[in-house]
Amino acid sequence: MEKHLHPPPPSPHGRRRRQQRRCEWVFLDVPSDITIHVDDATFSLHKFPLVSRCGRIRKLLAELPDSERPTSIELRGLPGGADSFDIAAQFCYGVNFEITSANVADLYCASHYLEMTEDYSNSNLISRAGEYLDTVVCRSLETSVEVLRCCEPLLPLADELRVVARCVDAIASKASAEQIASSFSRLEYSSSGRLHMSKHARGRGSGGGGDWWAEDLSVLRIDLYERVIAAMKSRGVRPESVGAALVSYAQRELLKKARPDREPRLVVETITGLLPLERFAVPLSFLFGLLKSAVALDCALSSRLDLERRIGSQLDAATLDDALIPSSGNEGDTLFDVDTFHRILINFSQQDCDSEDDDLESLFESDSPAAAASPSQSALFRVSKLVDSYLTEIASDANLKLNKFVAVAESLPAHARTVHDGLYRAIDVYLKAHQGLTDQERRKLCKLIDFQKLSQEAGSHAAQNERLPLQSVVQVLYYEQLRLRTAMLCTGSSAFPDDDAKPAAHQSWRISSGALSAAMSPRDNYASLRRENRELKLELARLRMRLNDLEKEHVCMKRNMDKDKSSSRKFLICFARLIGKMRVFVRCYSTASQSPSTSKQLQGEKMKQHNL
C-alpha cells in the first residue's frame, strides 16, 4: 500500500481538522448537547452550566434556530485560546481551578470576551481574575513584570481593559519604593548626630541594592518597556537607575540574532528617546555604542542628532575607540563616519562657547592660581588631544577629502591646542597618504599648524620634511633660529651676573660645588672662582663669534638659493643641520654655567665642536 507523505486535503466545507478535547471534569452520565470549537480544539459540553455564567454563549444560542441539533458554536479570536476556555468552562461547571500569574491575564481578557460578568452571575470569572490582579499581582514587582509579559499577545485588548496600566503602575510604584527604602537603609549618623549617606553607599552609586529590578525588566517587549520606564521617570526614580536599566535592556536586545532589521532599529530609537536629560546618567561609551548602532541601522535622523548632542556635552571624557564610528559602508565612503564626529565636535564647541562667560566670571572672582585653568579650558585640552589622535587615525584613508580633514581640524578654537605636535603628525600622515595634492592644497593644509607651538623634536623633523611646502619649512627654520637665539641670550645673562652680584653668585657656586675643600682659605676660594669666571666669559665670546660666522654662512647660502631655486631644499636642510650644531653649543654652555667646577672638562668638548 502506498504511503501518503503529505496530509490529506481539506474537506469540501473548508473546515480544519480539530482535536477533540477530553474534559475529565465533565459529567458523562448526561449526554452533551453543545459543541464548542476554539482554534483547533473541540469541547463537548452542556448548555445549562455555560449559559448560567457566560453571556456571549447565551446570546449565540439565542440566535440559532431550535431545529438545529446538536448545537455547534465556534469562538473565534478567544484570548488565550483553548487553554483559557478550558479554565473558563471548569469555572462554569463549578470545578476547582487555580488562578496564577501565568494565566490571570488570559482569564481576565477571556472572561471579558465571553461576557462572564456580574450581570449574569455573582462573583463571576472577571471579578475573580480582577481581584487576583489587585491583591496578588500588583503587590509584587516580579509578578507584575511576569503578567505584563503575558499581556504581549493579548494586545490591544489587555490595554483596553487596563491590565497593562495596572501592571505598569505597580512596577513603577514598587521600583520607586524599593529605591527609597534602599536609600534609607544606607543612611547613618555622623559624630555630630546628623544623618548622612555612608561612604560605602556613595561608592556603589546607582548599582546599589535598590536597582535589582533592571534585569527583570529586560524580558519585556520594547513597547511595554517604554511605558514602564516613562512611568518610573514620572515617579521620580533616579536618573542613574533609569540609565542603568536602559543599558541592561539595550545590551540584551541588540545582541539578539536572526531578527528583522526594523526591530533593532525600533529598540535604538526608543531607548534614545528614553535617555534621562541629566548628564552622566549613562556611560559615555554606551552613548557612543548606541550612536554606532544608529548609524549602522540607519535610524531616524532625530535620534542620531539627539545622541550627537548628548555626546558633545561630555566629549572630553571620550577615548579614541569611542570616536571611531564606522560608516554605513556605501561605495566611496570613508572607513569611519567623519561627518558624524564633526557634528559632535560642533556640539562640543557650541556648549563650550555657551559656558565661556560663566567661566570668565568665575575666573575673575577668584584670586587663586588654580582659577586660571577653568574646567572648560581643561576640557578643551583633552578634546584637542582626542581630535589630533582621531585625525592621525583617519589621515591614511584614501577616500578622505581634504575639506573634511580641514573641517575637523578647525572645529576647535585656536587656544585649544597648546602644542601642535599631534596636529603636525596627523598632517604629515595625510600628506604621505595623499601625494597627489597640489601645492595650493598642501599650503592650505599646513596653514593649520602654528609652527611656534611645535616642540624641539617636532620642529627638527619639520625642518627636514620634504613633504611640507617650502614656505612652511622656512617658517619652521625661522622660529627655530629665534628659539635658539633666545636660549643663548637667556643662558648668557643668567650665567654672568653683574659685578655687584658676584658675592651672591660665588656663594651659590660654593654651596653647589663639592670640589672645594672646606680647609681652603677664603682668599684661595675667591681667586679660584675669579679664574673660572674669566674662563666662562672667554667661552661665551668664542660662542658669539661662532654664531656670527654661522649667520654669515646663512646669508651666503640664501644668496645662492636666490640664484638657483632647485637648490632651495638643500639649503634649508643644511641650515637645519647648522641650527642643530648651535643647539649643541648652547646645551654644553648651559651645563658649564650651572657647574663651574666642571668647566675645564667641558671646554675640550666645546673646542672639538668649534673645530668641526
Image: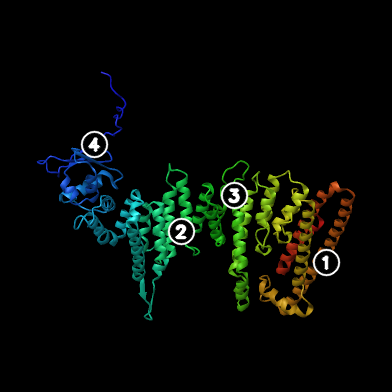
Q: Position of residue 157 (x, y in %)?
A: 34, 52
- In the rendered image, is residue 241 in sight? yes
Q: Residue at x 60, y 69 (%)?
A: 355
**What amino acid is labelled 1 in the image?**
Ala
* Residue receiving disc 1: 541
**Is 514 situated left or right of 487 in this image?**
left
Report the disc number at residue 19: 4
Query: Residues under labels 1 and 4: Cα distance?
Result: 114 Å
* Residue receiving disc 2: 274
Q: Secondary structure at mark 3?
A: loop
The quarter of the picture where the C terminus appears is bottom right
* Residue receiving disc 3: 337
Query: Residues under labels 2 and 3: Cα distance?
Result: 25 Å
The quarter of the picture where the N terminus appears is top left
Q: Position of residue 17 (x, y in %)?
A: 27, 33
**What amino acid is labelled 4 in the image?**
Gln
Query: Residues under labels 1 and 3: Cα distance?
Result: 59 Å
**Mark in the foreground, 4 or 3:** 4
**Mark in the foreground, 1 or 4:** 4
